Amino acid sequence: MAKPYTKQELMIITVARQINDGDNCLLGIGLPTIAGAIAKHTKAPGARLMMESGIVDFDPLVPPMHVADACCTEGYAYAIDLFGMFTSITHCGFLDKAVLGVAQIDRFGNLNSSYKQTVDGEPERLTGAGGAPEFISYAKETILTLKGGEFVEKLPYLSSPGYFGGNEEREKTGRYPKGSGPSILISPDAMFKFDKDTKELYLFALAPGVSLDRVKSRIPWDLKVAEKLESFPVPTDEELTFLRRFSPRSCFSSVVAGELSVNAAIKRIADREAFLGKCREANSALGG
Amino acid sequence: MGRRDSSKVMTTTEAVQQFVHDGDTLIIGNYTESSPLALIFEVMRQKKKRMTLYSQSGNMDAELLVGGNCIDRMFSAFIHKWGGRSGGSMVARYQQSGKLEVEDYTNFTYSAMLAAGASGFSCLPVLPAIMDTDVFKKRSFMGDKKFGVITCPFTGKETPMVPAANPDICLVHVQRADKFGNAQHWGGLGSTVHACLASKKIIVSCEEIVDHEVIRSSPHHTIIPDFRVNAVVEEPWGAHPMDLPGYYSSDLNMLGTFSYYNAMDTGLANWTKEWVYDLPDRTSYLQHYIETYGNQMLERYRAKPYYSAPTNYGIANRSLWDGEGKSTGLNIDFETLEKLIIERGDLVNG
């Protein structure tokens, strides 16, 4: 009997399955690095994982907090700088896959991570473009993950090029490698691909227990759906065990993970207070 | 480029007094990993004003300097939202209220401006896809000078360009340096080398000042040569609560507190009063940390060793004279050489 698993675990492992042995694979921070670690420790030990700070061919031991995290420097094969990461590796065609998180996406896979629009139409800062624009432009293929992000009809700001208005628009600019661009979008509820002709995003798989209506309710246009829907993969025990050891909090929703972390912090502080109390008692017993 | 006979070692207070000025263009040399926080705290304490900031990772560096009212304008590629999705960041709040102008680049185009500056070029080509984005089209204080487009003289293709950046002063925190300023850094390299070399002046803070011989035996780690450095300060835990390979990882306890305060509009002011303005230097900052959280808390984040394999830079012969005092090429001793010079040399004074 296989282990029971959560919705969050299923999403991360589904992303991990996109990474193949031998891939040169750039990981964005957050979920992509966790998925990369699972792949490296299960089906893709020969994948060269990399982050844009120039930490290339590394083996994540703990989840990094940022793309140059000191926790990722224990054992990696190639130290290049950010400029070389984008030019010699990415622009020169040596990046097989980029795995990137999404803040806002439109129906043709264009992304915004720079400015949102408030209800009053004012620009509201998101994180900024970071490295996504050049990775999605020049990686041979881009895997997108959408956890806290959203689908929008019209992006208030285009940070990273998808397929623009669809059809051959991306290819016609002459600025992108043939076949590049987002290939798949994975969310906790569903998976999407991009139509090979129109380049419009369409649903092709639903997560267990998720209805089509639920997915459609979060998409502000009439979503195209594949004729025959596929299922999500079934995580192996090996993948689940690795994930649980690598990043225990990633198995829960962010609300539950937050609650568990806060409780642990409170307990730590209480333990310390108790310890200090004992020290004070011992001190006063000694007349100090 | 200056004689190497005097030490550039000074205190953080002196370095900032001497080399950071109101109105300067200031760049943070580190990219996401590590941060020259001991130097940044001092810039805030000295209340430097009206500066333009280059901050690629928009981390604690940007939050503190912007919240400390040191910055009017900023070049940015990314902003960490310390207050979470709803709490935002000081940078976002100052920008929203019009107190801060921000020019947005991508990580690569930001890095390319520094590569141009570090190479002595006036501009540099960048990857063409940028032309299709709003990063290229929407412009703040750089206006027409944010990006340019030229026609490649060889392919005829339209090529976007960025202007060179040459900030007045760079603050950088590294693992080790010698007293002359040879600075060594390892780990995620980011744009650190270009940020330093593009700058007119550089203040290096380091965990340890080491002998010049240590530098000479490991030149592959030297990212800035001494002749480019203006001041060297030794600040153990100088990037705390951020991380530095081989020394410490991110202090999640302290970063959590910073994040918690920062989620409130007025919050950061309370944090900076306690941790920056009410303390004179990094030593008292560490003391205050240990008094508040205990030494064990700090020790939790200290790195365990993982040494790089020793690198053999050895050579076959350190001299053209062998152990018996004979020239390896002429097979004669020194005395015979000098005799031969008299006999066979084109003498000019004998």
Image: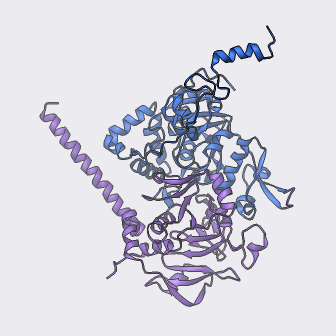
Chain colours: A purple, B blue
Which image quarter is the N terminus of chain B in? top right
Decide which of A277, A203 is in the foreground and name it: A203
Above or below — where is B227 with respect to B58? above
Above or below — where is A270 with respect to A25? above
Decide which of B137, B295 is in the foreground and name it: B295
Q: Residue furthest bottom?
A: A227
Quadrant of residue B203 within the rendered picture: top right
Above or below — where is A96 with respect to B54? below
Residue B87 in the image: state x and y as whole percent: 50, 57
Q: In the picture provided, is A260 more to the left or to the right than B152?
A: left
Q: Residue at x 42, y 32 (%)?
A: B283
Q: Is residue B47 visible?
A: no
Q: Residue furthest left?
A: A285
Q: Residue at x 62, y 43 (%)?
A: B193
Q: In the picture provided, is A13 more to the left or to the right than B287?
A: right
Residue B219 in the image: state x and y as whole percent: 58, 37
Decide which of B140, B99 is in the foreground and name it: B140
Q: Is residue B231 visible?
A: yes
Residue B11 in the image: state x and y as whole percent: 51, 27
Give the tally of numbered discs: 0
Which image quarter is the C terminus of chain B in? top right
Residue A229 in the image: state x and y as whole percent: 53, 88
